[in-house]
Image (cartoon, rainbow, N blue to C red):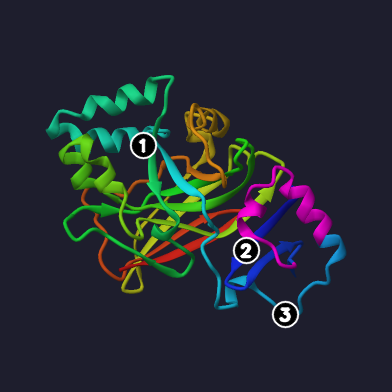
Amino acid sequence: MNTLRLYKLSEGAVVESRQRCYRLSAPVWDELLNRDDLHQYLSREVERLTPLENFSPLDAGNLQPPIGRQEVWAAGVTYYRSRSARMEEAKDSGGGSFYDRVYHAERPELFFKATPHRVAGHNTHVRIRRDSNWNVPEPELALVVTSSGRLIGYTIGNDMSSRDIEGENPLYLPQAKVYDRSCALGPAVLVTEQTLPPETEIRMEIVRGGETVFAGATTLSEMKRTPQSLIEYLFFDNSFPAGCFLLTGTGCVPPDSFTLHTNDQVRITIEPIGTLINTVE
């Protein structure tokens, strides 16, 4: 797969190609993420630039979340495991059947997730709500989409969720999903012209006090809907001048007995994007 990794640093952008890094000259992040020809553009830049010596974006100390003015949206109930988990959490409120209906419907569940200032980056903190007692991370493949609706790349997303609030009433979904640092993206944008294969794995590990308290994985083959179909529905009568991020749902959910604690570390890995690490605040 001919891929490039694009990193956002506090002083600019760096592209990684074949394990070598190149600093882009005076790029505007929003302009980069809104280029339909981003892969071709970065490939040309790599050919003319001099590689940085002994440089790793992950060790630079100024890595930023890969977002500018883009909105973050999310799709729900795209995996059978998510459908089952959300039916269970909502059964007492009478909303359990909603999720089964969405899973089998033509129209997907799409909801607003985060503005840029609510997004955490790699090796920073995510939050759990103070008025919630049942919180989980949801590891997801995030699509990077231009204003024209073109899929130009992928990153890793962590959709932090308050399951007890959503379970109390499905109408509380925005409160369960949208709050400060309720979303994490990173560490890089994988820029590619090729579709990720169905066997692509999404792995999550939650570490507490140095010990793994949850580990799970799923693959893109378990996703019921295609990325392109989700993009098409998101763009129906909707516009995104700077492009957008679209989380594609989760198939890796901790058991109902699990909830996050302060200082838990969440590690989400999708190769060849990398690993997104966040600590719960």
State the separation of the CA atoms marked 1 and 3. Answer: 43 Å
Counting from the top left corner in percent of width and height, residue 15 is at: 70, 63
Tag 1, which secondary structure?
helix
Q: How many angstroms separate mark 1 from mark 2 (CA)?
A: 32 Å
Q: CA distance from mark 3 to mark 2?
A: 16 Å
Could you tell me the amino acid type at mark 2? Tyr
In this view of the protein, can residue 272 be seen by the observer?
Answer: no
Mark 1 and mark 3 residues within 8 Å of each other at the beta carbon: no
Residue at image mark 1: 81
Name the residue furthest left. Answer: 92
- Give the quadrant of the C terminus: bottom left
Mark 1, other Cα within 10 Å: few <14 / some 14–19 / many ≥20? some
Q: Position of residue 253 (x, y in %)?
A: 34, 46
> Is tag 1's residue or tag 2's residue first in the polypeptide sequence?
2
71 on left or right of 40:
left
In front: label 3 or label 2: 2
The secondary element bearing badge 2 is classed as strand
Q: Are marks 1 and 2 in contact (CB under 8 Å)?
A: no
Q: Is there any visible trace of residue 134 in the rendered image?
A: yes
User: Residue at image x 66%, y 38%?
Assistant: 195
Image mark for residue 54: 3
Determine which residue is flagged by label 2: 7
Q: Which mark is residue 102?
A: none
User: What secondary structure prevails in the magenta region?
Assistant: helix
Residue 266 is covered by the magenta coloring: no
Q: x%, y% of residue 88? A: 22, 36
- In the displayed structure, 71 sits above or below 214; it is above
Q: Which residues are magenta?
A: 25-45
Residue placed most toward the observer, 240 or 75: 240
Q: Is residue 92 left or right of residue 152?
A: left
